[in-house]
């Protein structure tokens, strides 16, 4: 049984008759719950597919501390995609996982899960079952909002945008203050907090770095957190190449997924411009698990970095061929969330020596289909660079940087386009300098130099 994709408020499934007082009472109780259905999670379709793929790439290995939370969010995403049967299956898997992990059949850690099930059964018109879950929530609820609820909400919000990540770090902090001995919460809080600086020149505050040091001491086997810490140290100019190599070997000893730490590790190599080392690590991981779409995605990213950012001589043709092959694979393996990889493919093809016809075709198709503001912004920024560096069309490049900057959505791509416009204006060589100045002055929500 399915429901249509919803982008507004959740609607009630069930009787077509006017709601009676008992139905209104149930609706009121459901709205008061803390669960995915009440957390203002209204991603657009592009974001839904992105989160779906991200969760699948985490994996569901036994022993994963967040496994119950993964099933809960996967269930909600399936609901948003209209697959209520799959949503119910995943919510039930979350229930069983929490019971197994906690070695008990009830407890406050089930409140979010029971809330999800209450909402889902209500949407299915099964209000008796919905009421049963409300009774179960009453049975496990103990006083004020429980730290387990704060932690699950925090973990969930981390999968969304920067603003929600910042909210997530505050929720994790509340949970930690109530239950300081759960090291996974502190580690996840630091990973989420520092990820907000990924594309920023700003530095975390000293208190944040001290919290990171403490988290590393308390969770020494967390290789993802270790990679995050090394990335911060590299950003400060420390010499960490030997430690990065040592961490690489440690990560490659275990099955590699998006929670294994390989992505932040590869980003360290990108930061220190050691592109060949990044490629080597990604290829070694792929050799162990050649069918992993996530590892193909990581490897494609490394090749793209080398082609785009290497200051040495032009990469050889085999590098381009491997990059193109991986990107084409990744696009086919992520059919609903491959937008950025199509942009990457167009950019790599443009530099490969095979001409610009294919790149033009890809960009043209993307420009016609992009509707999400974030996707549009990223596309306009990338297309502007393509027009400038590959097509040598400076004025048209400026227009697309303006299009990217005009979209009122905070992102790396917007700030990158604004910086490009400021640089062109300050050089004073373009006949569009006055137009750029007027445009920048009209960007009310952004401080420009």
Image (cartoon, rainbow, N blue to C red):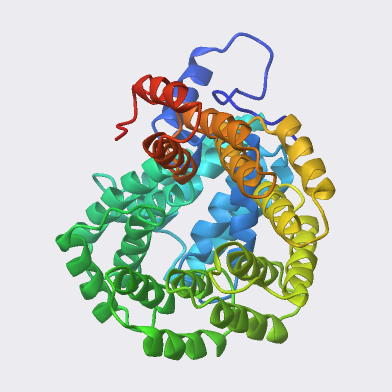
What residue sits 56% from the left and 69% below the top? Answer: 310
391 vs 96, left or right, is: right
| Rendered-image quadrant of the C terminus | top left
Residue 365: name its quadrant. top right
Residue 366: name its quadrant. top right
In this orientation, which residue lies closer to the viewer: 406 or 231? 406
| Image: 312 above or below 403 | below
What residue sits 56% from the left and 31% below the top? Answer: 373
| Image: 246 above or below 141 | below
Q: Position of residue 116 (x, y in %)?
A: 53, 43
Q: Position of residue 368 (x, y in %)?
A: 75, 30
| Image: 430 above or below 308 | above
197 vs 343, left or right, is: left
In this orientation, which residue lies closer to the viewer: 139 or 301? 301
| Image: 268 above or below 121 | below
Residue found farthest to the top: 18
What residue sits 32% from the left and 33% below the top? Answer: 448
The answer to whether one can see residue 74 in this image is: yes
The answer to whether one can see residue 34 in this image is: no
Q: Position of residue 234 (x, y in %)?
A: 33, 73
174 vs 88, left or right, is: left
């Amino acid at each position: 049984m399915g429901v249509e994709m919803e982008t507004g408020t959740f609607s009630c499934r069930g009787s077509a008759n006017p709601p009676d007082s008992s139905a209104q009472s149930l609706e009121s109780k459901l709205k008061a719950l803390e669960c995915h259905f009440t957390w203002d999670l209204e991603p657009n379709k592009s974001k839904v597919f992105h989160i779906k793929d991200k969760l699948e790439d985490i994996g569901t290995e036994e022993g994963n501390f967040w496994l119950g939370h993964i099933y809960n969010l996967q269930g909600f995403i399936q609901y948003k995609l209209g697959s209520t049967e799959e949503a119910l299956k995943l919510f039930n898997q979350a229930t069983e996982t929490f019971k197994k992990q906690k070695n008990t059949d009830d407890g406050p850690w089930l409140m979010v899960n029971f809330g999800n099930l209450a909402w889902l059964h209500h949407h299915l018109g099964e209000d008796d079952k919905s009421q049963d879950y409300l009774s179960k929530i009453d049975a496990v609820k103990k006083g004020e909002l429980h730290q387990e609820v704060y932690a699950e909400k925090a973990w969930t919000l981390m999968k969304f945008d920067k603003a929600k990540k910042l909210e997530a770090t505050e929720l994790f902090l509340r949970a930690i203050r109530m239950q300081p001995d759960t090291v996974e919460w502190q580690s996840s809080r630091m990973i989420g907090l520092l990820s907000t600086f990924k594309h920023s020149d700003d530095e975390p505050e000293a208190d944040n770095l001290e919290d990171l040091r403490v988290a590393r001491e308390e969770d020494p086997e967390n290789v993802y957190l270790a990679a995050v810490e090394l990335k911060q140290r590299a950003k400060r100019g420390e010499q960490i190449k030997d430690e990065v190599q040592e961490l690489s070997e440690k990560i490659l000893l275990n099955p590699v997924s998006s929670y294994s730490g390989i992505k932040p590790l590869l980003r360290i190599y990108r930061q220190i411009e050691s592109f060949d080392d990044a490629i080597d690590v990604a290829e070694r991981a792929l050799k162990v698990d050649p069918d992993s779409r996530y590892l193909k995605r990581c490897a494609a990213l490394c090749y793209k970095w080398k082609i785009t950012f290497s200051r040495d001589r032009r990469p050889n043709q085999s590098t381009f061929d491997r990059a193109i092959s991986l990107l084409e694979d990744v696009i086919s393996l992520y059919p609903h969330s491959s937008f950025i990889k199509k942009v990457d493919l167009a950019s790599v093809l443009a530099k490969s020596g095979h001409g610009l016809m294919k790149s033009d075709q890809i960009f043209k198709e993307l420009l016609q289909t992009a509707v999400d503001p974030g996707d549009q912004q990223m596309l306009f920024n990338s297309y502007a660079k393509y027009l400038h560096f590959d097509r040598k069309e400076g004025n048209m490049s400026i227009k697309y940087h303006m299009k990217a900057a005009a979209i009122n959505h905070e992102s790396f791509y917007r700030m990158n386009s604004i910086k490009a416009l400021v640089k062109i204006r300050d050089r004073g060589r373009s006949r569009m300098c006055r137009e750029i100045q007027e445009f920048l002055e009209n960007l009310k929500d952004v401080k420009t130099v």
